[in-house]
Image: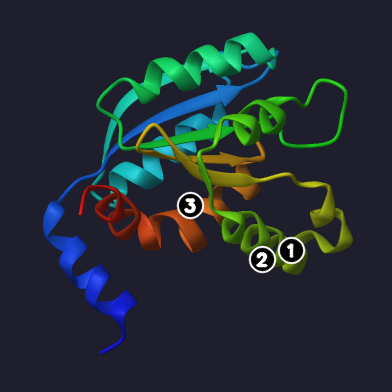
């Protein structure tokens, strides 16, 4: 058996992974936050618990404050959505990337590869990223519902217990 399979097997016994969600948007409200709601629904359907949720503007100070605050809480995984493009207001990536202690470049690479299959060359505009910050796994995905669904269903949820387990073993 491969070591990754052994690790996944060992990780399955840990149960629900506590997750925090941060939507980065200048316009979303809890009522209009389709992507934040989708993250919650997919994570809970997979048996995980949402322990934090907030919406922040795409201002570096607000993104950093949310990251620091949630990294000090009970979440073992923090998912940011929004602010990963190349527009002037897209600054989430810049803050998250600067703070990561152990980047997971494979997440962004795989996300863009899978996204390419859906949207073609426009996938290169995504600055989706992930890594470890203060012993928490942090993901930063684009804010569109399709991108969130892709990231969760194809990458994050299939490995969530393995990722969380790796930080505590």
Question: In the picture provided, is 125 more to the left or to the right than 38?
Answer: right
Q: Residues within 10 Å of mark 3 (few under 14, many from 20)?
A: some
Q: CA distance from mark 2 to mark 3?
A: 12 Å
Q: Which residue is mark 2?
A: 114
Residue 116, x across and y down, in percent: 77, 64
Residue, x 38% and y 63% (percent of image)? 158
Tag 1's secondary structure?
A: helix
Q: Is residue 161 above or below residue 76?
A: below
- Sequence order check, earlier mark of 1 and 3: 1
- Quadrant in the rendering for residue 93: top right
Q: Which residue is mark 1?
A: 118
- Sequence order check, earlier mark of 2 and 3: 2
Residue, x 51% and y 12% (percent of image)? 65
Q: Which residue is mark 3?
A: 152
Residue 50, x across and y down, in percent: 30, 31
- Quadrant in the rendering for residue 1: bottom left
Q: Is residue 128 above or below residue 165?
A: above
Residue, x 54% and y 50% (percent of image)? 149
Q: CA distance from mark 1 to mark 2?
A: 7 Å
């Amino acid at each position: 058996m491969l070591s990754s399979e052994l690790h996944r097997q060992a990780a399955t016994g840990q149960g629900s992974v506590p997750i925090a969600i941060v939507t980065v948007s200048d316009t979303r409200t809890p009522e209009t936050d389709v992507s934040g709601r989708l993250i919650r629904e997919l994570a809970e359907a997979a048996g995980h618990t949402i322990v934090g949720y907030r919406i922040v503007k795409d201002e570096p100070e607000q993104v950093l404050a949310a990251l620091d605050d949630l990294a000090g809480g009970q979440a073992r995984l923090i998912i940011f959505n929004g602010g990963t493009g190349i527009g002037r207001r897209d600054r989430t990536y810049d803050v998250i990337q600067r703070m990561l202690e152990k980047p997971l470049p494979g997440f962004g690479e795989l996300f863009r590869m899978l996204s390419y299959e859906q949207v073609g060359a426009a996938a290169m505009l995504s600055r989706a990223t992930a890594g470890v910050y203060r012993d928490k796994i942090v993901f930063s995905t684009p804010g569109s519902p399709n991108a969130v669904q892709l990231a969760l269903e194809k990458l994050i949820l299939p490995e969530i217990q393995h990722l969380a387990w790796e930080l505590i073993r």
